[in-house]
Image (spheres, grey):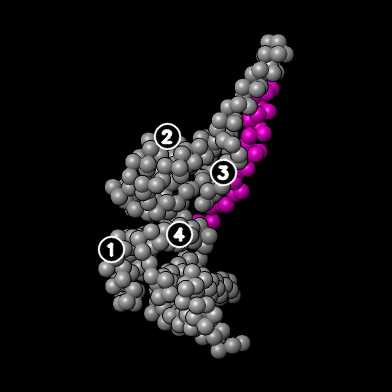
Amino acid sequence: MSIRDLIMNDLIDKNITDKKSQLLEYYRSRSAELIVNVKQTFSDSEYKKRSAAVNQGLAHAKDNLVKIIEQKGRKENWQQKCILEGILLVTYTNYIVMIEARNAVWPYEYMTFSRRIGEIWEPFCQLCWEYGINKELAYFVPPLFRDVKRTLTQEIEELIDSLQISEEQRKELKAYYQKVWNLVTSGEIKLELDLHFQAENKKYVVDFKSGFSSNEKGNTNRLLLVASVYKILKDNYHCLMFVRSSEDRNNHYLQILKNSGLWDVYCGSETYDQIRKFTKFNLAKWLSKNVNWEEDFDSEMFIHLQQNNLTQYLQW
């Protein structure tokens, strides 16, 4: 076992939730090594490759810590809540250093930072399902559009065949029906969203969104189409949208979805209420206790965010 493995094993125990500073120190040490390595491997102009390599290395470090938590949790019979809270902290501190490292080799600007926060918020929330304390929840495999289309087509064709009309009229009706499909989509519709789980004999499909901006028209239309497909299926699907930002910080595209009757939309604190409802874990309370971006980022990183008006995206 290497010295690094010994340090990692010593770091992870039942008191992991009290070790934020140690976790940050560990990740920053690993980040420093990675940055030295990528600077030797890639030139200054290859900042994207530098960033990708550092991110990959830090993600690997986090995955190793998560594995140790899982292993020790099983061997030492940790409560599931302890495991979840440990993994949340290991993940959050990893995000802190990953953002710092990315900024060191490729400084963030508006678009890249807002996108990055959205990218990490969704899987962070999903940890409450993946390592959740509510044992009644179960994942399910989302349907394939091709199977949905095949089933619906078969049902319509059987209905047309049962009508008291001529064979020529049947062919004409089926041809018109196929034209409708062609209008709806020129290819396959992806019915897989961010999360699919079952609770109390109901199936839920969830789309996580950091927020709705001016370029969401295409995505809004796609989400309306996807929810319309789920609405006509027989398996009692419920489409939920969990939005990170408060409702007043989103534009009219969110209102289109909210008023469609197809999506149950929750924003800001409402989202965390729903997470608690389903997973039985109070993520909002955990965030309030453990997340402090201003204190947890190093001073150089936070000054960069302030100078570029990026702190607005740190409202979890």
Q: Where the N terminus falls, by quadrant?
A: bottom right
Q: Secondary structure at mark 2?
A: loop
In the image, which is nearer the foreground, mark 4 or mark 2?
Answer: 4
Counting the numbered discs, the total is 4
Q: CA distance from mark 4 to mark 2?
A: 27 Å
Q: Where the C terminus falls, by quadrant?
A: bottom left
The residue that disc 2 covers is 261
Residue at screen point 28% across, 73% down: 303
**Earlier residue among tags 4 and 2:** 4
Q: CA distance from mark 2 to mark 3?
A: 18 Å
The residue that disc 3 covers is 191
Q: Amino acid at mark 3?
A: Leu
Q: Which mark is residue 119?
A: 4
Image position, residue 65 (x, y; %): 53, 75
Q: Which of these two is toward me, 200 or 267?
A: 267
Q: Which residues are magenta?
A: 132-159
**Earlier residue among tags 4 and 1:** 4
Q: Secondary structure at mark 3?
A: loop
Q: Secondary structure at mark 1?
A: loop
Residue at screen point 50% across, 37% down: 225
